[in-house]
Image (cartoon, helix red, strand yellow):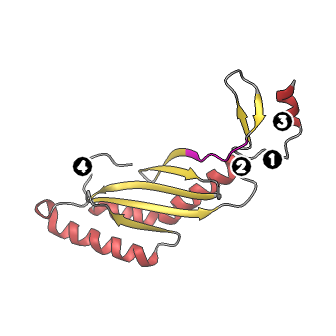
Amino acid sequence: MSSLRTLATAKLPVEIGSVEVAADGSVTRSTEAKPVRFGFEAFGAKFAGEVGAARRLTVTTDLGAMPYTIEGRDRRIDLAHIVAEARQALIGGTIAITPQQRVVLTLVDELEAPLTPSEIITAASMLALRAQPWIALTAKSASQTGKRG
């Protein structure tokens, strides 16, 4: 009966992370904030998302590898220009080249209360939509060797 009482007395809507299910199946109020991690696909890219305690949503995706000069000098130059332009024009995010020569897109948004599944899904979708032109541009230039996403 305590599980029902916990849910019945919870402020609606029930926020993600505000309740926990114990190993015995009982529901209790959460005493500590834990990050919410999830994944989704959009526009051919596999995103990893996380919402931390400060309601900060971060989504990232690996867009591919910088092509080696021998694979395509022009593609490498084009991709470097796209990354440089995105650093100035992409609102709420950035495209960076890792030390391993991977092209990584990172997007960030501050979420409003209450932190519900629909709030997270909507915000993540909006970030992916905002990045769609950059995803399309990099897809033509990035090498697809290795795992994308």
- SS label for mark 3: helix
- SS label for mark 4: loop
How dense is the environment of label 2, judged by Cα within 10 Å: few (below 14), some, or many (20 and up)? some
- Residue of label 4: 145
Q: Comparing marks 2 and 4, which lies closer to the viewer?
A: 2
Query: What kind of residue is marked 3?
Result: Leu
Q: Which of the marked residues, 4 or 1, is nearer the chain's N terminus?
A: 1
- Residue of label 3: 7
Instruction: Between residue 98 and residue 103, name the one nearer to us.
Output: 98
Chief secondary structure of the magenta portion: loop
- Residue of label 1: 13
Image location of residue 65, percent across then percent down:
27, 56
Q: Residue at x 50, y 56 (%)?
A: 59
The CA span between labels 3 and 1 is: 10 Å
Find residue 141 and name its label.
Answer: none
- SS label for mark 1: loop
